């Protein structure tokens, strides 16, 4: 009897665990997909192989956005284009980080889309619905510890002083503490931490020890670099506002010349 009771209790525990985890399946999938993608990229031997990973990631992003509300889906795909512009500047022009083949891998634009999707869907998760900004503050505390470590205990191990990560921290903190999109930025920190650690450990890209132009020392990766998504999110918001303005203007503009009313009595009965 005891064995049957133990088996039943185990089954009930598994059922409760599945119910609790079910709302997070997409986010857990993305946290697993990204390191696997970056591990595979570290093993690629040609640009064709790397491009195949890019095509796969575009397909994954497309699948993940199918059931999103139209507004969120538009935000994610706008992020892909806007983040690509930032990538071209940050990697190919500024050179603050470099991909191992000194290119912009095809999986990077949809990868930004996956990170942004991770963020825009976070507000609907139970942890944020139940605990609100307090859940985001816990994530910020984790980021704060990481940023402090980058200035204190990590440099003797990594031989890098992470000033750049510390400079990004106030931006991320403001977005979490002062904006209504706190869930987005808290989630983006977790997603960015996942991909940055996986990518730099795999050797897919490397942050320079000292940034060009401004000479700011950087970790590999910088601790609070997720704060940079404030620029991407802000740019997405501006583009959305511009599109909304154009749509309103199009509705307000007549399609053709208005007909000129005939003079009173013209063509009437005599």
Image (cartoon, rainbow, N blue to C red):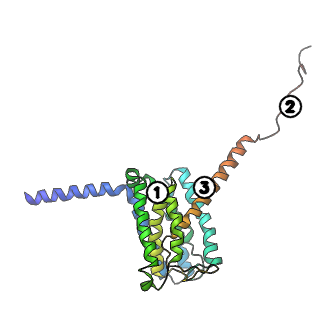
Q: Residues within 10 Å of mark 2 (few under 14, many from 20)?
A: few
Q: Residues within 10 Å of mark 3 (few under 14, many from 20)?
A: some
Cβ atoms at labels 2 and 3 below 8 Å apart: no
Nearer the observer: mark 1 or 2; the answer is: 1
State which tag comes first along the sequence, 2 or 3. 3
Asked if residue 57 can be seen in this view, the reply is: no
The residue depicted at 17 percent of the width and 56 percent of the height is 9
Instruction: Name the mark on residue 183.
Output: 1
Q: Which residue is mark 3?
A: 237
Q: SS of the residue at dot 2? A: loop
Q: Quadrant of residue 209?
A: bottom right
Q: SS of the residue at dot 3? A: helix
Q: Nearer the viewer, residue 182 or 200?
A: 182
Q: Residue furthest top?
A: 270
How far is disc 1 from disc 2 in space, using C-alphas?
A: 55 Å
Instruction: Name the mark on residue 252.
Output: none
Q: Which residue is mark 2?
A: 260
Indicate left or right for 178 with 91 as reference: left
State which tag comes first along the sequence, 1 or 2. 1
Q: Does 249 appear above or below 268?
A: below
The residue depicted at 19 percent of the width and 59 percent of the height is 10
Quadrant in which the C terminus is drawn: top right
Residue 136 is situated, as x and y percent measured from the top left of the image, at 43, 59
Q: Does 152 appear above or below 180?
A: below
Residue 12 is situated, as x and y percent measured from the top left of the image, at 21, 55
Nearer the observer: mark 2 or 3; the answer is: 3
Q: SS of the residue at dot 1? A: helix
């Amino acid at each position: 009897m005891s064995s049957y009771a133990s088996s039943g209790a185990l089954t009930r525990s598994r059922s409760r665990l599945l119910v609790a985890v079910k709302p997070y399946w997409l986010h857990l999938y993305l946290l697993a997909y990204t390191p696997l993608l970056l591990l595979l990229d570290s093993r690629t031997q040609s640009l064709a192989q790397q491009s195949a990973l890019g095509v796969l990631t575009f397909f994954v992003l497309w699948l993940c956005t199918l059931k999103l509300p139209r507004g969120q889906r538009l935000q994610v795909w706008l992020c892909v284009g806007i983040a690509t512009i930032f990538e071209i500047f940050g990697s190919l022009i500024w050179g603050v980080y470099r991909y191992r083949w000194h290119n912009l891998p095809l999986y990077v634009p949809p990868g930004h889309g996956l990170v942004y999707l991770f963020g825009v869907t976070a507000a609907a998760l139970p942890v944020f619905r139940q605990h609100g900004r307090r859940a985001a503050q816990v994530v910020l505390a984790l980021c704060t510890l990481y940023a402090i470590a980058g200035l204190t205990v990590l440099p003797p191990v990594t031989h890098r002083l992470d000033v750049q990560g510390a400079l990004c921290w106030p931006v991320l903190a403001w977005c979490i503490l002062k904006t209504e999109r706190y869930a987005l930025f808290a989630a983006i920190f977790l997603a960015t931490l996942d991909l940055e650690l996986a990518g730099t450990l795999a050797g897919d890209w490397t942050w320079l020890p000292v940034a060009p132009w401004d000479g700011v020392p950087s970790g590999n990766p910088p601790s609070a670099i997720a704060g940079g998504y404030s620029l991407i999110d802000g740019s997405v918001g501006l583009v959305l506002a511009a599109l909304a303005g154009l749509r309103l203007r199009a509705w307000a503009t007549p399609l053709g010349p208005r007909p000129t009313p005939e003079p009173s009595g013209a063509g009437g009965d005599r």
